[in-house]
Amino acid sequence: MTIKRIATPKRTSEILNKYGFHFKKSLGQNFLIDVNILENIMNQVGIDKQAAAIEIGPGIGALTEQLAIHADKVLAFEIDQRLLPILEETLQNYENVQVLHQDILEADVRQAIDTYFDQGQPVHIIANLPYYITTPILMKLLRENLPVASITIMIQKEVAERMAAVPNNKSYGSLSIAVQYYTHAEVIMSVPKSVFMPPPKVDSSVLQLMLRDTPPVNVENEEFFFDVVQASFAQRRKTLRNNLTRHFKESLEREKIVQLLEAAGIDGTRRGESLNMQEFADLANTFYLELKK
Ligand code: SAM
């Protein structure tokens, strides 16, 4: 028996026509119609029958089907009620898939992992994310410190580049630090617009994030650290000294800021984009300890 995969233009059109389904742009619905891309992702992630997979936004099941074939168990969160009966049909041959009708931003993912997967089973999150909320979804998953080995996401190319960027690169910014504080980030694949239905306006990339056991730097206070990072990039062309003076104008004199930069061992005439994560940590810790006095 030949199995007709979901991720082909023909099968996708058939399914959409059968259910009279119309794409909702507001939910970032661009469905994958290329099996080769999906198989490539499976190979790169190295999912096997020991592993569990979480998918965000299964759509009509193109990626879910591949996960069901390669992983032990699959749990998918889908916000669009209209897709549930469709998924019921398209995934009927796969008994290891559970679809939850939930907004991922509201979902208790930790609890779901406990409920649906075996204890100690490696968990991988894989998704072709709705582009309109890529960053909020990813930051939610990272901040929750979930028991997850990797997160592999298909996202807008520029956003993937920003998340994986290193210092002195034009894409490097507060998002790079936020993502790399929790993970090792690498862009592993480019994805052309033509493999989606409907094709999106932007190019895509697959970003692979391997979660760290511990953060790469010690920070006194995480919230303060991210706040200092954000302030340092507020106006990219300005020096650190100027950005920080503006940010701390209510609490610190300019002279004090110059002193603190010196104490942290960082030249205030540098720009935020030249600092690595350790330097940001030194900077934030020095300011934090002063303000806590
Ligand atoms: N995985 C499918 C594929 O690759 O063909 C569909 C990907 S499509 C880019 C994004 C999917 O995420 C859609 O099915 C959309 O309805 C769903 N979605 C959008 N916002 C969501 C949210 N907040 N929580 C869960 N799913 C969401």
Image (cartoon, rainbow, N blue to C red):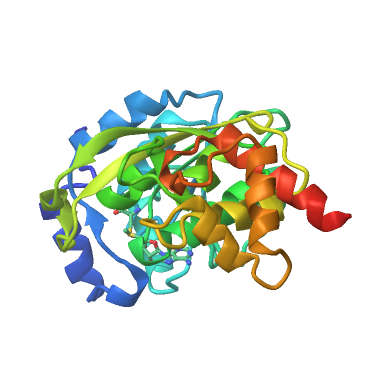
Name the residue located 35 percent from the left edge and 30 percent from the top edge: 42
Q: Could you say where residue 208 lies in the image, as x and y percent from the top left?
A: 41, 35
Q: Could you say where residue 21 lies in the image, as x and y percent from the top left?
A: 25, 74
Q: Quadrant of residue 26?
A: bottom left
Query: Along the line of sight, which residue is nearer the eye, 94 or 284?
Result: 284
Query: Along the line of sight, which residue is nearer the eye, 139 or 68?
Result: 139
Query: Along the line of sight, which residue is nearer the eye, 259 or 43?
Result: 259
| Quadrant in which the C terminus is drawn | bottom right
Name the residue located 52 percent from the left edge and 31 percent from the top edge: 72
Q: Does residue 77 appear anywhere in the picture?
A: no
Q: Could you say where residue 139 lies in the image, as x and y percent from the top left?
A: 55, 54
Name the residue located 72 percent from the left edge and 34 percent from the top edge: 218
Q: Is residue 70 above or below residue 18?
A: above
Q: Is residue 246 above or below residue 193?
A: below
As drawn, is 129 to the left or to the right of 139?
Answer: left
Q: Does residue 215 appear anywhere in the picture?
A: yes
As drawn, is 85 to the left or to the right of 257?
Answer: left
Q: Residue furthest right?
A: 293
Q: Residue furthest front?
A: 255
Name the residue located 56 percent from the left edge and 23 percent from the top edge: 50
| Quadrant in which the N terminus is drawn | top left
As drawn, is 28 to the left or to the right of 100?
Answer: left
Query: Along the line of sight, which residue is nearer the eye, 16 or 226?
Result: 226
Label count reads 0
Q: Quadrant of residue 27?
A: bottom left
Q: Could you say where residue 78 lies in the image, as x and y percent from the top left?
A: 46, 63
* Image quarter where ligand 1 lies: bottom left
